[in-house]
């Protein structure tokens, strides 16, 4: 469930927290009145067409600054157990150049365990406060190159009416990891539709990062109308409709692939070779106990070989070891 929650959160961050780096189109270098207007949008979150949650994206003014916020709530079932997961984030920025980020807060809860991460500007850097499991930790963090210009980049780009095929390179900021990752967005098509008898122009935008590809629709003011990735959908809805949710189907069951014959006593199985159908271009990764085999001509059956004899020794670089062994907010390994 935690993995799924992280996946869904990336959905919100794709549309809420993006930063221009280098683009086909040039963005205005100043914030206009439109970019500071209060706004609240509600969305239903769907899994395989069934509504399992809602999210709220908002902008308001606080203490003379501007705050952007995001809240996500989902009802999930895994291995027969129900859990209501929630996640929220807010960031406060200056309303005048250079539009610095002043503070932020991120909270995640599964109904039993709650973790909060706070950011507070301190000189050129930030103080990070993490509260979880009854323990509060504080540490200094260096500068974070993220401003209100960055946060509103996608919205302002779409408002400029980019042409079909136009693209923009952006960055995605995660408060969970305090990292900025690159991503790219491209206008796949520009369409019109009747909404309440009124023609509405919208942009279909494909966004790619290292981990995921998403397709979203935005109106000509930059507001997201819907988004889709993997088996999840998010749709703009009135608040009461967005909040009308129910528990998902069992995620473990949804992820199962059935074989066409009994395996017998599975504790006696030493290796297993299965023919996999219906991948539609997808593939399994080779791993410590599995090999994914596709014939060179692409005409034969696709095989997944499981077991010790089909192991692949993973090659890990020194950089990967360093990155995965260092302390993070999720793994505070120096805490006694």
Image (tube, rainbow, N blue to C red):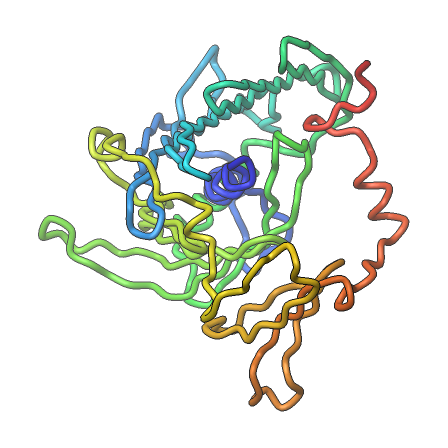
Residue situated in front as seen by the camera: 114 or 24? 114
Viewport quadrant of the C terminus: top right
Q: In which quadrant of the rendered view does residue 169 lie?
A: bottom right
Q: How many labels does the image show?
A: 0
Q: Position of residue 80 (x, y in %)?
A: 41, 37
Q: Which residue is drawn at 46% across and 68% down?
A: 165
Would residue 183 appear left or right of 160 to someone viewing this image? right
Residue situated in front as seen by the camera: 254 or 137? 254
Q: Which residue is drawn at 43% across and 32% down?
A: 81
Does residue 165 lie above or below 142 as drawn? below
Q: Position of residue 214 (x, y in %)?
A: 47, 55
Q: Visible in this render: residue 13?
A: no
Would residue 110 appear left or right of 244 to someone viewing this image? right
Residue situated in front as seen by the camera: 107 or 195? 107
Q: Residue furthest right?
A: 318
Q: Position of residue 281 (x, y in %)?
A: 52, 73
Would residue 33 appear left or right of 125 to someone viewing this image? left
Q: In which quadrant of the rendered view does residue 36 lie?
A: top left
Q: Visible in this render: residue 198?
A: yes
Q: Position of residue 308 (x, y in %)?
A: 76, 62
């Amino acid at each position: 469930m935690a993995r799924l929650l992280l996946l869904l959160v990336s959905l919100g961050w794709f549309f809420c927290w993006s930063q221009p780096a280098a683009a086909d189109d040039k963005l205005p270098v100043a914030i206009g009145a439109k970019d500071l207007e209060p706004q609240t949008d509600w969305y239903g979150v769907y899994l395989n067409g069934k509504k399992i949650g809602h999210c709220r994206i908002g902008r308001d003014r606080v203490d003379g600054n501007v705050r952007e916020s995001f809240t996500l709530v989902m009802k999930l079932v895994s291995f027969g157990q129900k859990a209501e997961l929630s996640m929220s984030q807010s960031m406060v920025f200056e309303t005048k150049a250079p539009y610095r980020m002043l503070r932020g807060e991120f909270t995640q809860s599964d109904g039993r365990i709650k973790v909060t991460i706070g950011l507070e500007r301190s000189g050129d850097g930030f103080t990070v406060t993490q509260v979880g499991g009854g323990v509060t930790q504080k540490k200094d963090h260096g500068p974070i190159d993220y401003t209100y210009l960055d946060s509103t980049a996608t919205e302002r780009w779409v408002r400029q009416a980019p042409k079909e095929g136009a693209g923009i390179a952006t960055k995605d900021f995660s408060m969970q990891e305090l990292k900025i990752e690159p991503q790219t967005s491209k206008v796949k098509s520009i369409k019109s539709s009747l909404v309440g008898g009124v023609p509405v122009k919208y942009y279909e935008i494909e966004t790619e990062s290292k981990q995921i590809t998403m397709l979203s629709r935005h109106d000509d003011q930059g507001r997201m109308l819907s988004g889709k990735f993997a088996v999840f959908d998010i749709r703009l809805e009135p608040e009461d409709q967005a909040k009308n949710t129910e528990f998902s189907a069992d995620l473990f069951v949804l992820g199962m692939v059935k074989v066409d014959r009994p395996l017998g006593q599975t504790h006696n199985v030493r290796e297993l070779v299965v023919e996999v159908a219906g991948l539609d271009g997808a593939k399994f990764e080779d791993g410590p106990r599995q090999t994914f085999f596709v014939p060179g001509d692409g005409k034969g059956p696709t095989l997944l070989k499981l077991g010790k004899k089909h192991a692949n020794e993973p090659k890990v670089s020194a950089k990967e070891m360093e990155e995965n062994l260092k302390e993070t907010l999720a793994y505070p390994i120096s805490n006694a």
